[in-house]
Image (cartoon, helix red, strand yellow):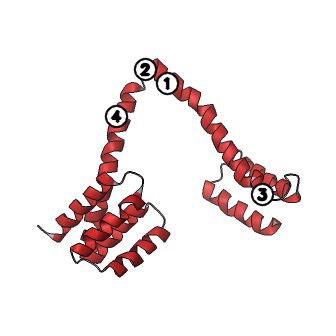
Amino acid sequence: MGIWWALFLLFLKAGLLSFGGGYSVMPMIEREVTDRGWMASGEYLELAAVAGLSPGPMATNTATMVGYHTAGIVGAIAATAGIVLPSLCIIVLAAAFCMKLSRHKWVRSSFYGLRPIVTGLILYAALYVGFLALPKPILHWSTFATLLIAAGSFLVMLRFKWHPFKVILAAAAAGIILF
């Protein structure tokens, strides 16, 4: 069996067993790659640390890095495909199931009912992170400045159709100036 196929199968197994997130399969991956002699335990731990700091899912980053370290670009592709394939299949099946169910009146109604709840949860999270978790009182100059940045961001996106990335940059600049 070729190295690429071995990488694919190893990470396919990891993708199937990664209930609880990518961190839950990290010990299994370490054992497999060290037992196969693909890398030493110290090398794997360094690689896992870099994967954890990289943007994106930990398990996917680890698979890509182990694959690249072991067998170059093709190894990275094989390992990444292996770890992503189980989740992709589950999502496709769930989407097909949801599309079939979405024709039913009670499913559509429940999704409409979930909208205000999700909006409320997002609003609560924004308020909590923005104001309620702070040690200072809510009526503070920084509260006013934060609300001003938020209102300005909302306005330029709604009225002037700015791209969200431009709005984030402008809000960051306003934060630097005001705070």
Q: Secondary structure at mark 3?
A: loop
Residue that appears at 33% across and 43% down: 90
Q: Is residue 73 above or below residue 23?
A: below
Query: Can you identify the residue that label 3 sits on?
Result: 134
The spot of residue 143 in percent (x, y) is 83, 55
Residue that appears at 66% across and 48% down: 161
Q: Between disc 1 and disc 4, whose residue precedes? A: 4
Residue that appears at 46% across and 68% down: 52
Q: Between disc 4 and disc 3, whose residue precedes? A: 4
Query: Can you identify the residue that label 4 sits on?
Result: 96
Which quadrant of the view contains residue 159? top right
Q: Between disc 2 and disc 4, whose residue precedes? A: 4
- Mark 1 residue type: Arg
Disc 1/disc 4 C-alpha distance (Å): 15 Å
Disc 4/disc 3 C-alpha distance (Å): 44 Å
Query: Can you identify the residue that label 1 sits on?
Result: 108
In the visual, does 80 lie left or right of 46?
left
Mark 2 and mark 3 in contact? Answer it, CB < 8 Å: no
In the visual, does 169 lie left or right of 137?
left
Q: Is residue 160 visible?
A: no
Q: Nearer the viewer, residue 133 or 93?
A: 133
Mark 4 and mark 3 in contact? Answer it, CB < 8 Å: no
What crowding class fits label 2: few (fewer than 14 Cα within 10 Å), some (14-19), or many (20 or more)? few
Q: Is residue 87 above or below residue 107?
A: below
Task: Say the numbered circle drawn on residue 104.
Answer: 2
- Mark 2 residue type: His
Q: Secondary structure at mark 4?
A: helix
Q: Between disc 1 and disc 3, whose residue precedes? A: 1
Q: How many marks do you count on the picture?
A: 4
Mark 1 and mark 2 in contact? Answer it, CB < 8 Å: yes
Mark 2 and mark 4 in contact? Answer it, CB < 8 Å: no
